[in-house]
Image: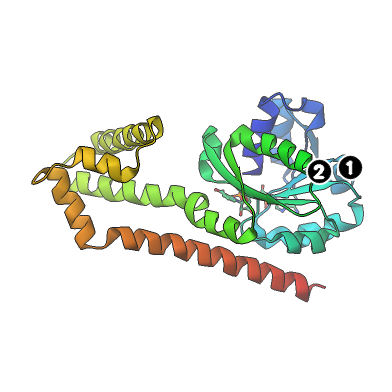
Amino acid sequence: MGMTYAEAIAKSNLLTSGDLMILDKSEEKRAELRATQLFDVHDQLNTCLPKADVVLIAVKPVHAITLMEEMKPMVSDGQLFVSIMAGVTIETIKQALNSVKVVRAMPNLPALVGLGMTSFIGSDDVSRLELAAIERLLDTTGRSINLTSESEIDASTGISGSGPAYIFYFMQALMDAALKMGFGEDDTRLLVGQTFSGAIELFNSSTLSPEDWMAKVASKGGTTRAALDSMDDNNVNELIQEAAYAAFRRAEELGKQTEGKETKNG
Ligand SMILES: NC(=O)c1ccc[n+]([C@@H]2O[C@H](COP(=O)([O-])OP(=O)(O)OC[C@H]3O[C@@H](n4cnc5c(N)ncnc54)[C@H](OP(=O)(O)O)[C@@H]3O)[C@@H](O)[C@H]2O)c1
């Protein structure tokens, strides 16, 4: 995900390639990165971190504390840290880095194709101007929304962060049904993929709600009504909502666990 942001920012013309430093642990990866000529590639924190105005932290949450402890002695006033790590709270980052300027962002996988949805929030010490600059960087991977509380970040994790997987779940179910009905793999992929693309395009083309669109497709006694009635009879709507809440609760739990680790490590 860090690479996705780096590439999107590099291609956006917001920064020139020399302005964009990347730290990566793997020699193989560094060679690949150098070959793109998009980045100033580093293998040590001390050669890049002190020079950075904005630092994007994109390691797995489980590596967060170790990395930030390594960073802490090199952090200087005025540096701004943007974390995309799921469940790692602003307070954890502020304490771990001894820094006050932190933006916590929650991206999602479609960032890979420039259609990401990122929610973000800044700590009190991040100015409106700085937040606007960060928003421009985040928007290189799609669209973003500036939320007002960290609880909303956890909630957005349950909607847009984990959301693409719910869509894939629904796609897989429809593909399983198509295969059972006798369609081959290629036809199944086309039937389902194009149906999703078409529905999403329709949704984005107007202000109609999904319910409005369902009403347009379903007529009384018809095939679509039979399917929608079956879903309603099985409480599919409630089950999907419950799934989103499960992700929300898990995001909150992960945040508490990371805060616990920070406390244990002092
Ligand atoms: N993927 C998503 O859809 C998504 C959505 C929302 C949020 N996020 C967040 O994005 C973050 C990254 O996720 P990901 O799926 O992109 O993980 P990933 O593929 O494992 O990427 C993390 C990278 O950080 C490197 N790394 C680990 N420790 C490091 C250190 N001390 N110094 C320098 N580099 C280090 C890893 O190298 P090694 O492989 O060598 O360890 C790896 O290349 C996570 O915090 C996740 O919560 C991801």
- Tell me what residue is drawn at x 91 percent, y 50 percent: 77
In this view of the protein, which residue sits in the foreground, 19 or 219?
A: 219
The kind of secondary structure element at disc 2 is loop
Drawn side of residue 213 relative to residue 145, left or right? left
Q: Residue furthest left?
A: 221
Q: Nearer the viewer, mark 1 or mark 2?
A: 1
- Tell me what residue is drawn at x 21 percent, y 48 percent: 177
- Tell me what residue is drawn at x 53 percent, y 66 percent: 250
Q: Is residue 20 above or below residue 263?
A: above
Observer able to see residue 196: yes
Q: Which residue is mark 2?
A: 43
Separation of marks 1 and 2 at Cα, in angstroms = 8 Å
Quarter-wise, where is residue 266 in the image?
bottom right
Drawn side of residue 16 relative to residue 115, left or right? right
Q: Position of residue 171 (x, y in %)?
A: 32, 46
Q: Position of residue 235 (x, y in %)?
A: 26, 62
Quarter-wise, where is residue 1 in the image?
top right
Q: Position of residue 86 (x, y in %)?
A: 61, 57
Q: Which residue is mark 1?
A: 47
In this view of the protein, which residue sits in the foreground, 76 or 66?
A: 76
Q: Position of residue 127 (x, y in %)?
A: 79, 45
Drawn side of residue 142 relative to residue 68, left or right? left
Quarter-wise, where is residue 117 in the image?
top right
Q: Is residue 250 above or below residue 104?
A: below
In this view of the protein, which residue sits in the foreground, 123 or 57?
A: 123
Q: Amino acid at mark 1?
A: Thr
The answer to the question of whether label 1 and label 2 lie on touching residues, with beta carbons closer than 8 A, is: yes
Observer able to see residue 181: no
| Mark 1 residue crowding within 10 angstroms, few (<14) / some (14–19) / many (20+) | few
Q: Residue furthest bottom?
A: 264
The kind of secondary structure element at disc 1 is helix
- Tell me what residue is drawn at x 60 percent, y 61 percent: 151
